[in-house]
Image (cartoon, helix red, strand yellow):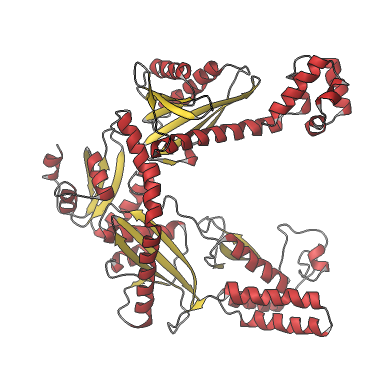
């Protein structure tokens, strides 16, 4: 079928979508010549992630467009829409904090991360900063040196900041625009990398305080100077201008692509970003799409970016609408080589850790699929139940995709009946979850794991059968020490022993711990919302009269928990006191 379709593909620019046996799109790519690019997947031998991708391809689709630029834009939009398994580039990347200078009549500084939010016209953003602490420290420094607005809403009278000289009292006083403009210009110069004005200002204040023998104050100012020198004054580069630019480099080895970018702001290297991942497509394509998506999510594009020779500068420049250049000589060329060298060092240093992580996630997931005779194991859903003497009955579901937790897919279930019935809980949560999957056409898992024995497995299978859903259900059996020892699977059910030193064991244990902790945390949240009155209602032997007396004397659960068993026996009959004591002790766990 694939060979027949390939013969019909034209050699025109466009995008292609690879599908697995379930018809799910697992990879999206673009090509200047579709026929050549698609054919390359199905001829010759492949290694690494490309080989794994090809082994899962059952079908493909393609879309022809007018130019490579159009194909590039379409590719990015299709990746956003389908989030394919093998398009992993920016899935786990962090966003960088920026400092925003708000100019709503009066100046105010704040730290922001979501730089692409369209709530306001963001003209004064400075960064990126290496972390939120560095950004906040810089804001605190400027707030101390300049009387900026600190409050989020205007008060009817000046606050404490006004009285200690750190605010001009914008809420009640009329401030000359000239004074505000002068202060704003100083702050902008500082945020753009010119620290000379503030350094001079701090030095003058430090010497003045020292001359007055205010040594503690002078010491604080000296620490501010040290902070500026050590933290804010970055490595200077001799490019000959102060244009904001990013420099991109890469290194390839053993099926992995290491990417680095240096952020140069105000003639100084402000920060760097790195990413290492197994590549699927041609290096040129992987790099180009990564850079394009990076500026959509993480960082504001600078005026210029420098890239290696393999990048199509015209394509990237058109998409980002900024200057994209390949340096040929001089300091810019040297910096590009330095970034590529850092990419190489980063890959060499982390390669062993990457391999180990791959063994404990992706390869362990593949081993589990092999044991269970599953052709595909992309999504696993794991369930656990929790209750306290039949009360606060809840269940939690966590999801692992391709060997790693997918926290956005986690779900909590508050069970409708408060009683100690694990089978009833399992029946309810399984029906609610998978009726919703059918109703809303949600992604189905390839495997369901219940953190329980054969009984819970039977309940789960029974519910799935009633919904006419064919999904494998397995269970995890614990030994006498409450440690996972066997995997319950197949039909009829058999116990599969798992080597406790194997990566598969660590993988199953990690999933089990993840769902247990997630469910317990939800259980504790619900309990923390319960009042002392509702807690006392759950204890056998405490009626209306006793409850009223306890509530009058002990207003909170905390105060009641401070009592030991003997103290409780002075208030209640022995058996009721024991019930309450055991309940409160269990309530903490």
Residue 269 lies left or right of residue 27; in this view the side is: right
- For the residue pair 182 and 461, the one nearer the viewer reads as 461
Quarter of the image where one finds residue 395: top right
- Above or below — where is 105 with respect to 506? below
Quarter of the image where one finds residue 390: top right
Residue 404 lies left or right of residue 145; in this view the side is: left
Task: Report x, y in % for residue 259.
Answer: 37, 62
Task: Report x, y in % for residue 406.
Answer: 46, 41
Name the quadrant of the C terminus.
top right
Q: Is residue 104 visible?
A: no
Task: Report x, y in % for residue 397.
Answer: 50, 31
Residue at 72% over, 28% down:
585
- Above or below — where is 232 with respect to 72? below
Residue at 33% over, 47% down:
78
Number of numbered tags placed on the structure image: 0
Q: Can residue 579 be seen in this view?
A: yes
Residue at 28% over, 55% down:
255
Residue at 36% over, 24% down:
471
Name the quadrant of the N terminus.
top left
Task: Report x, y in % for residue 364.
Answer: 37, 39
Quarter of the image where one finds residue 496: top left
- For the residue pair 267 and 152, the one nearer the viewer reads as 267
- For the residue pair 77 and 396, the one nearer the viewer reads as 396
């Amino acid at each position: 079928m694939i060979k027949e379709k390939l013969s019909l593909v034209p050699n025109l620019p466009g995008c292609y979508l690879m599908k697995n046996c379930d018809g799910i799109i697992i990879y999206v790519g673009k090509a200047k010549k579709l026929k050549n690019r698609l054919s390359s997947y199905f001829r010759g031998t492949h290694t690494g992630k490309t080989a794994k991708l090809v082994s899962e391809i059952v079908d493909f689709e393609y879309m022809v467009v007018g130019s490579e630029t159009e194909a590039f834009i379409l590719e990015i939009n299709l990746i956003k829409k389908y989030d394919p398994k093998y398009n992993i580039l920016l899935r786990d990347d962090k966003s960088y904090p920026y400092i925003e200078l708000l100019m709503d009549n009066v100046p105010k500084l704040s730290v922001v991360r979501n730089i692409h939010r369209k709530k306001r016209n963001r003209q004064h953003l400075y960064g990126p900063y290496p972390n939120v602490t560095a950004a906040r420290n810089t804001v605190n420094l400027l707030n101390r040196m300049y009387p900026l607005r600190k409050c989020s809403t205007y008060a009817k009278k000046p606050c404490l900041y006004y009285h200690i000289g750190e605010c001009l009292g914008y809420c009640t006083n009329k401030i000359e625009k000239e004074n505000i403009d002068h202060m704003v210009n100083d702050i902008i110069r500082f945020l753009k990398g010119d620290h000379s004005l503030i350094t001079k200002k701090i030095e003058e204040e430090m010497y003045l305080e020292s001359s007055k023998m205010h040594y503690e104050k002078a010491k604080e100012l000296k620490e501010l100077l040290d902070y500026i020198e050590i933290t804010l004054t970055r490595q200077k580069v001799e490019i000959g201008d102060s244009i904001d630019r990013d420099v991109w480099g890469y290194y390839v080895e053993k099926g992995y692509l290491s990417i680095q970018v240096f952020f140069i702001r105000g003639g100084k290297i402000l920060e760097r970003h790195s990413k290492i991942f197994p590549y699927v497509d041609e290096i040129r394509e992987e790099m180009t799409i990564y850079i394009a998506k990076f500026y959509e999510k993480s960082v504001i594009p600078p005026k210029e970016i420098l890239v290696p020779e393999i990048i199509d500068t015209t394509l990237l420049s058109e998409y980002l609408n900024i200057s994209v250049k390949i340096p040929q000589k001089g300091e810019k060329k040297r910096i590009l080589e330095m970034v590529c060298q850092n990419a190489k060092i980063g890959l060499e240093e982390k390669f062993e850790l990457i391999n180990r992580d791959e063994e404990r996630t992706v390869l362990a997931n593949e081993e589990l699929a092999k044991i269970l005779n599953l052709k595909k194991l992309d999504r696993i859903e794991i369930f656990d139940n929790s209750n306290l003497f039949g009360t606060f009955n809840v269940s939690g579901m966590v999801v692992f995709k391709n060997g790693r937790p997918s926290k956005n897919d986690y779900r909590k279930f508050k069970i409708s009946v408060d009683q100690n019935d694990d089978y009833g809980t399992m029946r309810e949560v399984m029906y609610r979850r998978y009726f919703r999957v059918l109703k809303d056409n949600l992604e189905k898992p390839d495997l369901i794991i219940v953190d329980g024995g054969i009984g819970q497995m039977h309940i789960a299978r029974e519910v799935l059968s009633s919904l006419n859903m064919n999904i494998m259900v397995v269970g995890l059996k614990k030994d006498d020490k409450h440690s996972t020892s066997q995997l319950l699977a197949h039909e009829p059910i058999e116990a599969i022993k798992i080597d406790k030193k194997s990566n598969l064991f660590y993988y199953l244990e990690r999933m089990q711990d993840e769902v247990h902790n997630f469910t317990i945390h939800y259980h504790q949240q619900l309990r923390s919302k319960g009042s002392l009155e509702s807690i006392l209602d759950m204890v056998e032997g405490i009626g209306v009269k006793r409850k009223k007396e306890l509530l009058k004397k002990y207003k909170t659960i905390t105060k009641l928990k401070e009592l030991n068993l003997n103290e409780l026996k002075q208030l209640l009959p022995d058996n009721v006191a024991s019930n309450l004591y055991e309940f409160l002790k269990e309530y903490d766990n």
